[in-house]
Amino acid sequence: MNAFAALADDTRREIVRLVAKNGELTSTEIGQNFKISAPAISHHLKVLKSAKVLNMKKEAQKRIYSLNGPSINEMEDWLLDIIDLWNKRLDKLDRYVLKIKKERTRDKK
Amino acid sequence: MIKNNVETIIEGNKVIYKRYFDVPTELLFEVWSIPEHLAEWWGPDGFTLTTKRMDFTNGGIWEFIMHGPDGHDYKNKIQFTDIKEPLHIHYKHLGDGEGDQDVHFESKIIFEEVGEGTNLIMEQIFPSKEELERVNEKYGAIEGGKQHIGNLGKYLEKLK
């Protein structure tokens, strides 16, 4: 699952928001903010970790989560690329439809 | 963020493009719906496009490959969810169809008749609002920078 798919879930977005706000949080601290079961939270954390949205480090028995900066930047760049691509594409579309319009008007004459 | 007749807005989890085309709505709809037309404009500069299959109906799939100038192939799979000629086309992006790069976002293309021409409004809906908000800040900075350069260019023209 990529980062976008991982973030398509409401609970996971909420988790990311919490972690981003606090810098670092243990899985227990994250769980305290939700009404859902510990295993469910653990599953969400695993998804976010494998999608590289969150980093995890272990200290003794604790699992500490933080935001994966480079991966978030990658997502942003990808989005900016898409926006840029569409603007260029629409430029091209504009040239293309005007060309067709000209050809068809000529054919009618 | 308006340049000539283009506007790109980032709002919530959507990116919205608005643009005026000086052609009838039917023609604009036509070039969105036929593979031969799409091949002419869909690829970025230097790219060519091969349509593997296209079923331009509700629920139909358009599968195509973009061949990059560097010899790289990019597979794409799109599913049309709602088509109403010549008013709108809604579709879902299903990534590369291989399932390992499942980027999911939806697009709505709306064709609005304006006199002799057409306003094209395109909404891209992404799963993550937070990401888009951050991108908006970045994008604003980039666009601002572009305008800045544009203004500088105009100013230099004046000095000539």
Image (cartoon, coloured by chain):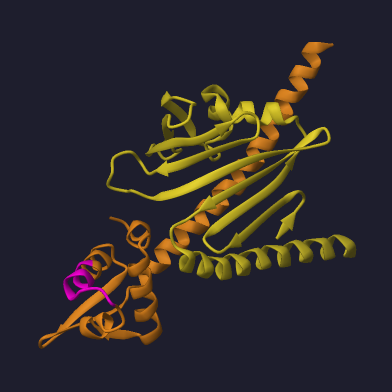
Residue B68 placement (x, y as % from top left): 44, 38
Chain depicted in yellow: B
- Taking the image as drawn, is residue B160 in sight? no
Residue at image location 45% in from the left, 50% down from the top: B105
Quadrant for the N terminus of chain A in the image: bottom left
Q: Is residue A50 left or right of residue B27?
A: left
Taking the view exactly as shown, the residue that stands out farthest to the left is A60
Residue at image location 39% in from the left, 76% down from the top: A17
Instruction: Say which of A54 and B146 sits in front.
Output: A54
Q: Is residue B143 left or right of residue B125?
A: right
Task: Place residue A109 in its image quadrant.
Answer: top right
Q: Is residue A23 left or right of residue B88?
A: left
Q: Is residue B133 left or right of residue A46?
A: right
Q: Please give the range of residues in magenta.
A: A35-43
Residue B131 placement (x, y as % from top left): 46, 66
Instruction: Say which of B72 and A34 sits in front.
Output: A34
- Taking the image as drawn, is residue B140 in sight? yes
Task: Place residue B54 in its image quadrant.
Answer: top left
Residue at image location 69% in from the left, 54% down from the top: B7
Residue A53 vertical position relative to residue B76 in the rendered view, above or below: below
Task: Place residue B10 in its image quadrant.
Answer: bottom right
Magenta stretch holds residue A40:
yes
Give the tally of numbered discs. Answer: 0
Taking the view exactly as shown, the residue that stands out farthest to the front is A35
Colour chain A is painted in? orange
Magenta stretch holds residue B44:
no
Residue A40 placement (x, y as % from top left): 21, 69
Q: What predominant SS class does the magenta segment belong to?
A: helix
Instruction: Say which of A61 and A37 sits in front.
Output: A37
